Amino acid sequence: MVPASFFDIDGTLTKGNSKGYMITEFANHLMRANLFSKNGNSNINSMKKLLLAKKISYREIAVKLPEIFASSLEGTIEKNLNREAEVFTQNILKNSLFSYTKDLVNLMKSYGLTIGISGSLMQVVRILGNYFDFDLCYGTEAEIKNGTYTGRLKKNLITKEGKGTVFDSIIKQKKIDLSKSFGFGDTAQDLAFLSKVGNPIAVNPNQELLDIAKENGWTICQSEKTIINEIKLKLHKIRNT
């Protein structure tokens, strides 16, 4: 049995910003490259504004946004999207990593498997996963046939249910010691793995996850400066028990 660390990416390892999350910003990027429906992008940005105004829940965004995203890609050539995913992700790596990100992933790689489970599009997640040197990584997938996007959603990994399905599949395939494993997430959708590992870590949590973490006595990390030392202390205790 081996321990593993399960990471959400957006908001946990990469910074959100006033404009939105990675998947919404990628939609904006693709629209500017003429690879994404303008109407779909407008709908996504409208949902984002409603979320910021607290008129809809994060859960509603998690369910609806990937479907809009996938439908807005209908007719897009896969190789063209892959090209833009590389451009977009390099900007993320240059401007949107937390100061602790690479050190945290490297620290957990010295402990066991590292696994990324993100709601962002798989083409972006795959590039980030290669950069972080994750052992495994999973993202939201839009259906592709004959090298072209069909407009249908294949896999939604923003929702707790989607992440839970992937998590359960990993557990079946790998001999993972959940009691010694870690989970790092920033929203309640990450409860898919946070609630099942022995060491759940709420990183930059939104209010919903913050309340849950406090109620359950989970580790809460809200400072870029202290997170590495906090996790090192937890690893030290585990290794000496």
Image (cartoon, rainbow, N blue to C red):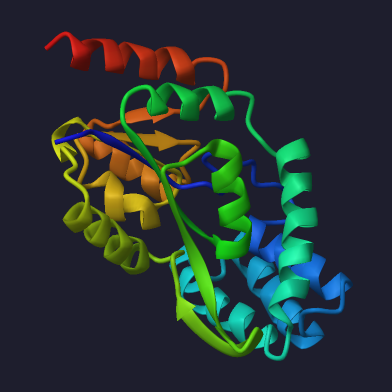
Residue 121 percent coordinates (x, y): 58, 65
Residue 21 visible? The answer is: no
Q: In this view, does 126 lie above or below 74?
A: above
Q: Quadrant of the N terminus?
A: top left
Q: In which quarter of the image is the C terminus?
A: top left
Q: Is residue 7 above or below residue 77?
A: above
In the picture, measured across the screen, residue 76 lies left or right of residue 149, that is right
**In percent of the image, x 77 and y 38: which residue is there?**
95
Residue 81 visible? The answer is: yes
Q: Is residue 86 above or below residue 15?
A: below
Q: Nearer the viewer, residue 227 or 59?
A: 227
In the picture, measured across the screen, residue 41 lies left or right of residue 145, that is right
**In percent of the image, x 64 and y 24: which residue is there?**
99
In the picture, measured across the screen, residue 66 lies left or right of residue 181, that is right
Residue 159 percent coordinates (x, y): 40, 66
Residue 60 percent coordinates (x, y): 47, 73
In the picture, measured across the screen, residue 229 lies left or right of residue 45, that is left
**In percent of the image, x 65 and y 46: which residue is there?**
16
Residue 172 percent coordinates (x, y): 17, 57
**In percent of the image, x 23 and y 47: which residue is there?**
195
| Figure disc tally | 0
Q: Which of 129 and 43 is in front in this view?
A: 129
Q: Which of 110 and 16 is in front in this view?
A: 110
Q: In this view, does 159 lie above or below 189?
A: below
